[in-house]
Image (spheres, rainbow, N blue to C red):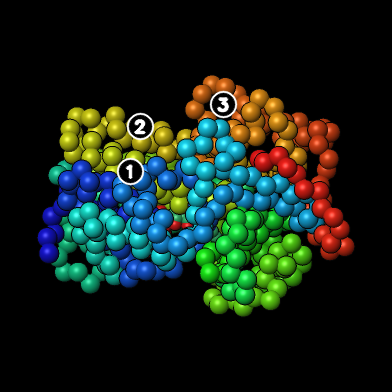
Amino acid sequence: MSSQFDVAIIGGGPAGSVAGSVLAKHGRSVVILEREKFPRFQVGESTIPGSLDTLQRIGVKEKIDQAGFLTKDGGEIVSACGGARAKFFFRNALNPRWKTAYQVDRMTFDDILLRHAQSLGCEVREETRVDSVEFDTDGVTLHCRNNAVPVRAAYVIDCSGRSSLLANRFRLKQPFPHLKKFSVYSYYQRNNKSNAPEDAYTRMIRGSDAWFWVIPIADGKISVGVVMDLERFQQLKLSPEEAFNRTIEEQPEVRKWVENTTRYMPVFATADFSYAVSQLTGERWVLAGDAAGFIDPVFSSGIYMAIYSGEQAGETINAALANPAKKSAACRRYERTVQKRLASYLKLTSGWYTKEFIEIFLHPREMMNMVAIVNSVLGGNPPRTLQERLVMGLFYFLVYLQGRTGKLVPHLTFQPEPARAAAPEEELEAKI
Ligand SMILES: Cc1cc2nc3c(=O)[nH]c(=O)nc-3n(C[C@H](O)[C@H](O)[C@H](O)COP(=O)(O)OP(=O)(O)OC[C@H]3O[C@@H](n4cnc5c(N)ncnc54)[C@H](O)[C@@H]3O)c2cc1C
């Protein structure tokens, strides 16, 4: 077992596996140090098409296609009372390259990615927790629990997820005060094992002080979760499981999904998951995936950002190894592109927690290709041209006007009203 590598990667989640695959394909020697034994549990089942090019480039897409995941062609956003709903489809994006994504069981998905990195030549050491990292002018030394011999590498990529080993050490993590959230979630088994397209949408149900996700996974399994203000959860004075059951019980639009199902997993709770990281690269290190920043699960951006930044981090380190003189420029490019995408999700997410954003979202207007451009952004394709940027700006301007005047589109109530939920619903055909 070697202890000297070009690159050591901390964490074998999607970011670490993709970064390792990219570097191994470039012929670099890579070790992935992973705390857990895979397959391991991870939340976050809903993916978007923006990752598919990378998955194809590293040669793993075929394995994912064969794994039996549900094909997801879009999603549905519903106001809590069911009074308004809008479906969005990836195929309605601007010139979509991929019209579908997957709903994945993360145990299987993450395992496929890690085994793929291994098949490309990465050395994968599971049940190997990195405890500390030392830097010197020639490289890095990683000390792992239960391993007497430290690992030595020229560079380290920290893909340790929200544990953020290096960002914590360097004090680079910055929480967002307006996104102090608490999430509780679990998994249910339905009798109906339908694979119909509409049964594979991600559904987001927006209440007045909480929102819910319902994500179908293959074989009739569904992931159900609620996100609320941390303060609200503390006021409830309930255990996470009690809060989960109570909030679902209050929402007919969610309740109908879990009726006649069996919960087969415990209730999990996670708090304070959104944060930025002020610096993503250093002399001998790069951060990728959640370790480089995470913004709320609402737009299913986590896996996409992990895969995107994993690929870019791999390319950045490869460029530094190939020509150290180009390292600074490569790192600057990496910082710029990753932070820009995170900023775009921050803007969408901050909007999501305002009433006016949902009102505009649920009453889309077809002008200047706005529906297609917003769909593209939701699919993981940031605006590329000036026109696309202007139209996104216009979208946010409409949200602003709705907030100021309240006159652009009808007001919505997010209070659950079971009587109204049972009445015929206003279904919107337009697809933001
Ligand atoms: C409530 C919630 C719901 C979510 N829902 C979605 C969703 O629907 N869609 C979506 O795209 N995203 C979702 N996400 C986000 C998504 O799960 C993450 O963005 C994604 O897992 C990030 O991948 P990663 O590789 O960066 O980190 P991870 O998947 O967390 O992998 C990091 C790995 O590092 C390992 N590790 C950590 N510390 C060490 C150490 N010291 N030494 C060695 N190994 C270590 C861990 O064991 C882990 O395997 C959700 C997140 C939350 C909190």
* Alpha carbons under labels 3 and 1: distance apart: 27 Å
Q: Is residue 27 above or below residue 9?
A: above
* Location of the C terminus (image quadrant): top right
Identify the amino acid type marked 3. Answer: Arg
The label shown at residue 57 is: 1
Residue nearest the observer in this picture, 392 or 167: 392
Q: CA distance from mark 1 to mark 2?
A: 20 Å
Q: Quick one: label 3, few (<14), some, or many (20+) residues within 10 Å?
A: some
Residue 176 seen in this snapshot: yes
Camera sees residue 301: no
Comes first in the chain, label 1 or label 2: 1
Of callouts 3 and 2, the N-terminal one = 2
Residue 389, numbered label: 3
Q: Which mark is residue 314?
A: none
Q: Identify the residue at image location x=76%, y=36%.
A: 403
Residue 422, image x, y percentages: 84, 62
Instruction: Give the quarter of the figure containing the N terminus.
Output: bottom left
Identified by mark 2, the residue type is Arg
Please report contact status of discs 3 and 2: CB closer than 8 Å, yes or no. Answer: no
Q: Is residue 188 left or right of residue 302?
A: right
Return the x and y of residue 357 as percentages of the image width and height: 70, 41
CB at mark 2 closer than 8 A to ligand 1?
no
Q: Residues within 10 Å of mark 1 (few under 14, many from 20)?
A: few
What element does badge 3 sit on? helix
Q: Residue at x 13, y 55 (%)?
A: 4
Mark 2, secondary structure of its residue:
helix
Instruction: Indicate the position of residue 413 as horizontal and vertical percent values.
Output: 82, 51
Residue 30 on image: x %, y % = 20, 53
Q: Amino acid at mark 1?
A: Arg
Tell which residue pokes out farthest to the top in this image.
Answer: 386
Res. 333 mark? 2
Q: Nearer the viewer, mark 3 or mark 2?
A: 3
